[in-house]
Amino acid sequence: MLSRVADNLYWFGRYIQRAENTARVVNVHANLLLDLPRKVQFGWTPLVDIFGAEASFRERYTEFSEANVVRFLLIDAQNQGSILSSLNAAREILRTTRDHIQREVWEKLNDLHYTVKERGEAALSRSKRQEFLGRVIDGTQLLYGMLACNMSHDVGFQFMRIGTSLEQADMTTRIIDVRSSNLIRSGAADELRPFQNIQWMSVLRSLTAYQMYRRHARIRVSGASVLRFLLQNREFPRSVTFGLNTIAATLPHLPQNRAIERTVDRTRALVHDANLEQLVESGLHEFVDEVQIGLAQVHEAVSNAYFRL
């Protein structure tokens, strides 16, 4: 397979997964707004920070208000990480890879793209936002389901699978980081202590993980147990370990490259050996940064091995 086509399929998987999970990150806030007392004030700056997009945000907005941040993440075409931009990028890739992906996927992607483009403005209000984000999540899951069931699981599919798995692992760490960031403005720590478990529960729900967590963990929601499930569980598809294991499982279908295998193994070991109880008390943000660096190194290793020929 041409390296250009492999690169396109890899990024197609990443962009579709990114659109879905950007919707999920915004949902973390939506769930907390519903579950916590009205007197609790939220800061929206961390939702921009976790995407590393502060400079881009400040170029066009003067205030980190709810309205500005939600617009930036949902429908701002100049933000390369917005839902609209991710779907735009996926559509452009699909134009050049028609021979590798079935026509029905193109039609469904077009439907989702125009839904976001035409209804995104109305979705900026709280009353419409949940439904809109739900449509994005359902639409992207439908696309991936069609690809998994109807696309030949050849080399092209394996590259798309690597992109999807890497993006999911990265975004799971970012959603966890929403919880570790200063979402709740200073001065409210004491009164929010009784609501710690509610916040962790919202992280699970943002990943549609609450029911599976209860099935696997069989204990009350707590910070360490949620981290263990989302970082280390081998069976839940949105956990970081599951994503890294999936990447490792695809490598035998591709030309052998020891650099990728070593990078995946290092990142898996970092996640597996983490002291989660200690991280809940302090150092979670720094640990997530380390994992994200490891995932970025996996991306670089894959790019160097297969795309930059």
Image (spheres, grey):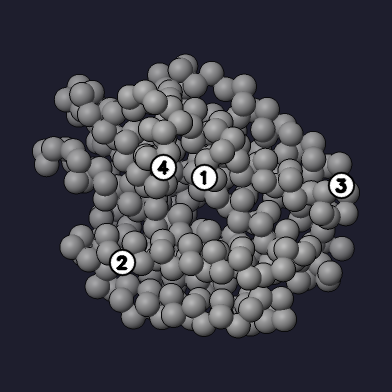
Comes first in the chain, label 4 or label 2:
2
Q: Is residue 37 visible?
A: yes
Pointer 3 local density, CA inside 10 Å: few below 14, some 14–19, many at least 20: some
Residue type pointed to by label 1: Arg
Residue position marked by numbered label 1 in the rendering: 238
Secondary structure under tag 2 reads helix
User: Would you say residue 44 is visible in this rendering?
Assistant: no
CB under 8 Å between callouts 4 and 1? Answer: yes
Q: In the drawing, what numbered circle is on residue 132?
A: 2
N-term-proximal mark, 2 vs 1: 2
**Residue 84 spot, x, y in % from top left:** 44, 70
- What amino acid is found at the position of numbered circle 2 in the picture? Phe
Looking at numbered disc 4 in the image, what kind of residue is underneath it? Ala
Residue plotted at (49% across, 78% down): 108
Q: Nearer the viewer, residue 250 or 169?
A: 250
Which amino acid, by three-letter code, is at mark 3?
Answer: Asn
The disc, 3 or 1, on the residue closer to the chain's N-terminal end is 1
Callout 1 secondary element:
loop
Residue, disc 4: 209
Other residues around mark 2 within 10 Å, as few (<14) / some (14–19) / many (≥20): many
The answer to whether residue 101 is above or below residue 297 is below
List x then y, in percent, for residue 17.
53, 59
- Camera-near label (3 vs 1) is 1
Spatial CA span between label 3 and label 4 = 33 Å
